Image (cartoon, grey):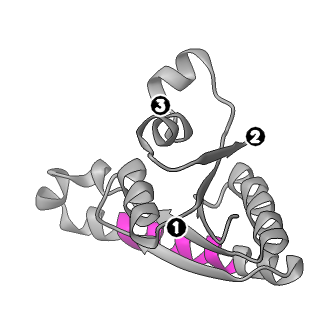
């Protein structure tokens, strides 16, 4: 049923919890997990021209975070017996990057973690999980 599972990760504890669910579903259904980490360049659009070193520092730190997240997921996948591929997107906003990869890999299921924010915090920070649910044409599992 779920042969191609897309796991959205940001390296957080909620993403790890979602990863455990993704790996378990992949193991049960004989599927594969593709973890996507999206580096949103938005904070430096426009500023990067005035301070290119700031943009490079931001991108370098984001790439390091992605590498660390992927290494941790690789260990977890090996422990749980599930195949894992990784995909780094550096030129899209987070939600659009997730949906782009889901379409390109023809995902049967998208799995995202939720930080469980509510109220003003959710209004100010937004909810990637909520946006993925509302914009995706594919099934989405939100793990809290």
Q: Which residue is mark 2?
A: 144
Task: Return the x and y of residue 59 as percentages of the image width and height.
Answer: 36, 68
Of pointers 3 and 2, the one earlier in the residue sequence: 3
**In which quadrant of the rendered view does residue 82 lie?**
bottom right
Q: Is residue 78 visible?
A: yes
Q: Main secondary structure of the magenta part?
A: helix
User: Which is more toward the observer, 29 or 7?
Assistant: 29
Quadrant showing the C terminus = top right
How many callouts does the rendering have? 3
* Residue 78, x across and y down, in percent: 81, 84
Establish if 62 lies above or below 84: above
Which residue corresponds to mark 3? 126
Judged by depth in the image, the label closer to the viewer, 1 or 3, is 1
Q: Which residues are magenta?
A: 58-71
Residue farthest to the right?
A: 79
Vertical relation: 101 (above or below) 127 = below
**Mark 2 vs mark 1: which is more N-terminal?**
1
User: Residue 116 is drawn in which quadrant?
Assistant: top right
- Give me the residue at 72% from left, 75% from top: 72
| Residue placed under numbered mark 1 in the picture | 36
Q: Is residue 94 left or right of residue 72?
A: left
Element class at badge 3? loop
Question: Along the polypeptide, which appears first: circle 1 or circle 3?
Answer: 1
Q: Residue furthest top?
A: 119
Q: CA distance from mark 1 to mark 3?
A: 19 Å
Q: CA distance from mark 2 to mark 1?
A: 18 Å
């Amino acid at each position: 049923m779920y042969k191609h599972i897309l796991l959205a990760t940001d390296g957080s504890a909620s993403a790890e919890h979602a990863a455990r669910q993704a790996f378990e579903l992949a193991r049960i259904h004989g599927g594969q997990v593709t973890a996507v980490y999206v580096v949103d360049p938005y904070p430096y659009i426009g500023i990067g021209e005035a301070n290119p070193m700031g943009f490079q520092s931001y991108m370098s730190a984001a790439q390091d975070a992605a590498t660390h997240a992927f290494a941790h997921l690789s260990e977890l996948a090996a422990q749980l017996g599930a195949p894992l591929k990784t995909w780094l997107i550096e030129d899209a906003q987070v939600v659009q990057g997730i949906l782009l990869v889901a379409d390109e890999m023809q995902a049967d299921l998208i799995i995202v973690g939720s930080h469980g924010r509510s109220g003003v915090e959710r209004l100010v920070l937004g909810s990637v999980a909520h946006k993925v649910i509302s914009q995706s044409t594919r099934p989405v599992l939100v793990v809290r």
